[in-house]
């Protein structure tokens, strides 16, 4: 009998994956099943989890201000959370490979649930920072586990499409939850917010508890510096780092930029961006499965750069929405392609470490972009920051183009 968290969901998926790893490609026109019971349940767990997370994310800085910390503390609670998540991801990746996926998902989600509910009793900024650190640890553990489980459940021949759909579970809550969260705390009372967020997270935990993960080979590697780093994931993770460097200043300063350009409400930017992401991610995944993950990611980088250039030149809401369109297509094309590339290049027993590297790069790029953008804005203004961000996306495109040129058979093998 297999271990509790490593039972088989779909034996045909495991057999198909083994055939692919052995070089036996499925017949042309015969698609491996994607919407299995396991994948549907994982999507439900993910949507509920991200709804609960996004409700709190944009509202907690307001709590820091309410507790007397000022604007500086609002930024600090965001940074503390991200830093804690980054620290725990590499160790989580190793543990996922060594011990199992579902147990880490349950543990991380449970930590998030406790942290969210405990926010209700935060009596000062210091205690709030401790809770944000605890939430970051749970977040880093659970999201790394979710991404690794997705890589186990998605058939290898449909990685791009599957990862596009999986990342869709993050973008749908982004279109709804932040506005709902801000509305819940509009009167200054955060109690309802934390109970609603905790309820959604609790439902996610309940579904995770009944999930079955596919049986797989365990790494059997003891923890060490080399076991925490999966070398095959470094290139796509580095490309993700460059992409999220452009995303950091966009999220951090778009409201301030709107005021500078005389745009009263930048909310429609996020609405358009979320809708475009929801459309682009699954469609671009199918294209990437057919033509290669590196070319798809390269196209995404060009579109992201175009979005940043459009944002830098925007003088009204129309320009902002056009920038959201370009950047949304670009990010929605590049991210799932890079995530699929991480999984495609790694052995199944090392998917946890590879996924951890990918999400660590994501977090680090966000932090570097936001912090560097703040310093650069004092010198070149926010429009200059967005121009520089476009240059970073172009640099990522060049790196991908060089890789494709030097390794033409890699993409060709997947077409």
Image (tube, rainbow, N blue to C red):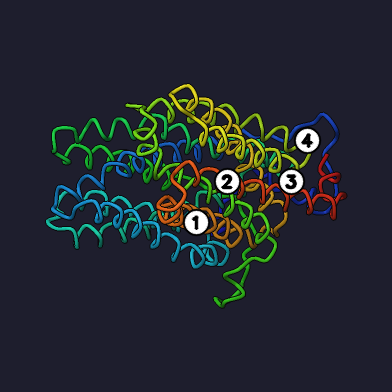
Left/right placement of residue 151 relative to residue 298 reads: left
Q: Cα distance, mark 2 to mark 1?
A: 18 Å
Give the structural element (helix, strand or loop) at label 1.
helix
Q: Cα distance, mark 4 to mark 3?
A: 11 Å
Q: Cα distance, mark 1 to mark 3?
A: 37 Å
Residue denoted by label 4? 290
Camera-near label (4 vs 2) is 4
Residue denoted by label 3? 294
Labels 1 & 4 near each other (Cβ < 8 A): no
Question: In which quarter of the view is residue 199 placed?
Answer: top left
Residue denoted by label 1? 4
Give the structural element (helix, strand or loop) at label 2.
helix
Give the structural element (helix, strand or loop) at label 4.
helix
Going from N to C along the chain, the mark reached first, 4 or 2, is 2
Camera-near label (2 vs 3) is 3
Q: Cα distance, mark 2 to mark 3?
A: 20 Å
Q: Which one is in front, 88 or 8?
A: 88
Camera-near label (1 vs 3) is 3
Question: Residue drawn at (42%, 50%), measured in percent from left and top?
Answer: 377
Camera-near label (1 vs 4) is 4
Camera-near label (2 vs 1) is 2
Question: In which quarter of the view is residue 298 placed?
Answer: top right
Residue denoted by label 2? 150
């Amino acid at each position: 009998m297999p271990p509790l968290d490593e039972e088989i969901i779909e034996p045909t998926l495991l057999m198909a994956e083994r055939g692919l790893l052995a070089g036996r490609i499925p017949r042309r026109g015969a698609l491996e099943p994607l919407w299995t019971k396991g994948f549907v349940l994982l999507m439900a767990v993910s949507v509920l989890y991200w709804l609960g997370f996004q409700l709190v994310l944009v509202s907690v800085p307001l709590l820091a201000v309410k507790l007397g910390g000022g604007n500086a503390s609002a930024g600090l609670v965001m940074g503390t959370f991200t830093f804690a998540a980054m620290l725990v991801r590499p160790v989580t990746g190793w543990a996922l490979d060594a011990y199992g996926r579902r147990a880490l998902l349950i543990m991380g989600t449970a930590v998030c649930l406790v942290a969210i509910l405990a926010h209700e009793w935060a009596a000062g900024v210091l205690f709030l920072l401790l809770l944000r650190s605890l939430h970051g640890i749970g977040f880093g553990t659970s999201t790394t586990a979710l991404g690794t489980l997705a890589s186990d459940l998605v058939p290898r021949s449909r990685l791009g499409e599957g990862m596009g759909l999986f990342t869709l579970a993050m973008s749908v809550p982004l279109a709804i939850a932040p506005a709902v969260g801000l509305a819940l705390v509009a009167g200054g009372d955060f109690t309802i917010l934390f109970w609603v967020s905790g309820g959604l997270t609790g439902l996610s935990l309940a579904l995770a508890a009944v999930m079955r993960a596919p049986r797989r080979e365990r790494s059997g590697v003891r923890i060490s510096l080399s076991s925490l780093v999966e070398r095959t994931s470094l290139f796509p993770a580095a490309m993700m780092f460059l992409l999220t460097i452009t995303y950091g200043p966009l999220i951090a300063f778009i409201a301030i930029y709107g005021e500078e350009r005389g745009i009263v409400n930048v909310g429609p930017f996020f609405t358009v961006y979320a809708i475009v992401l929801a459309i682009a991610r699954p469609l671009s995944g199918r294209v990437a499965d057919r033509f290669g993950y590196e070319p798809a990611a390269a196209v995404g980088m060009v579109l992201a750069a175009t979005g940043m250039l459009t944002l830098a030149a925007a003088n009204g809401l129309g320009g902002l929405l056009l920038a959201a369109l370009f950047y949304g297509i670009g990010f929605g094309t590049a991210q799932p392609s890079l995530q699929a590339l991480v999984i495609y290049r790694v052995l199944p027993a090392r998917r946890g470490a590879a996924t951890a590297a990918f999400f660590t790069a994501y977090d680090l790029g966000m932090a570097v972009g936001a912090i560097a953008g703040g310093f650069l804005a004092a010198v070149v203004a926010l429009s200059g920051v967005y121009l520089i961000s476009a240059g970073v996306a172009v640099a990522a495109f060049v790196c991908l183009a060089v890789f494709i040129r030097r390794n033409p058979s890699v993409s060709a093998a997947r077409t």
